[in-house]
Amino acid sequence: SQQGEEDPQALSIQEGENATMNCSYKTSINNLQWYRQNSGRGLVHLILIRSNEREKHSGRLRVTLDTSKKSSSLLITASRAADTASYFCATDAGSQGNLIFGKGTKLSVKP
Amino acid sequence: KAGVTQTPRYLIKTRGQQVTLSCSPISGHRSVSWYQQTPGQGLQFLFEYFSETQRNKGNFPGRFSGRQFSNSRSEMNVSTLELGDSALYLCASSLEQPQETQYFGPGTRLLVL
């Protein structure tokens, strides 16, 4: 079953704009991660935020976590065409100790 | 360090056949997880191996199996292939725990005809 659900499912923006993606989850977590996947390829880890953290930055990425609302957001500032990809959140709430991924947000950045 | 590698990258099989996919984790990583990705179901966890033992298993039928060798390399096998097994199979490695940062390979795209 899906734990994380990203919103929106698809997002189209112009280069230079900011992109915000949201993730909601159902059960308590120890950490939440964001991954990027370019078309049909493997996933690339972007950032991990632990349950006791509220915000984390990495370059042009900013992730927030609100455990009371069971939600997280990923902000990509000053987007570039190369940011075009699918973005997934993953939580460590798998009953078998595995990561559970959402279905992703497909981001399209137009030059 | 070299990244996670998966072979083969592409595979075409027919229904009823079996297939073996291989994954070499990042050097020093002992946990290897496998996922199936399809447009309809998204990324689904298959199983995770650590120190040659299957530590976790997802909700897939027994036709899906795997193993891990002493050098942490892992294989997964799918027997009696069905059309619905067509997917991108992704392998990911992590140091010790699958809940921590996972490093993914490029995937093996399997097409079952």
Image (cartoon, rainbow, N blue to C red):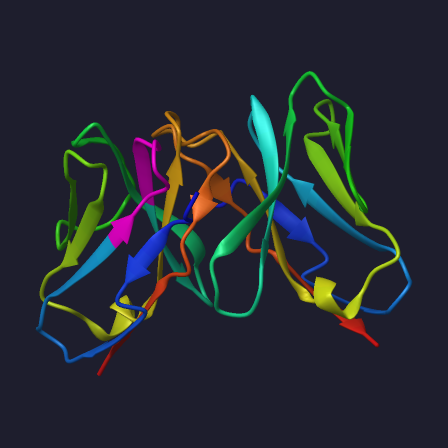
For this orientation, the residue located farthest to the top is A52
On the rendered structure, is B89 left or right of A23? left
Quadrant containing the C terminus of chain A in the rendered view: bottom right
In this view, the residue in front, B18 or B106, is B106
Residue A1 seen in the figure: no
Coordinates of residue A94 in the picture (x, y in percent): 42, 32
Quarter of the image for residue B112 reads bottom left
Q: Which residues are magenta?
A: B23-33
Coordinates of residue A29 in the picture (x, y in percent): 56, 24
Coordinates of residue B61 in the picture (x, y in percent): 18, 51
On the rendered structure, is A92 left or right of B56? right
In this view, the residue in front, A10 or A59, is A59
Residue B68 seen in the figure: yes
On the rendered structure, is B102 left or right of A95? right
Q: Answer above or below: position of A5 versus B89.
A: above
Q: Answer above or below: position of A109 versus A22.
A: below
Q: Residue at point 33% right, 42% down?
A: B33
In this view, the residue in front, A26 or A52, is A52
Residue B104 belongs to magenta span: no
Quadrant containing the N terminus of chain A in the rendered view: top left
Q: Answer above or below: position of B67 versus B50.
A: below
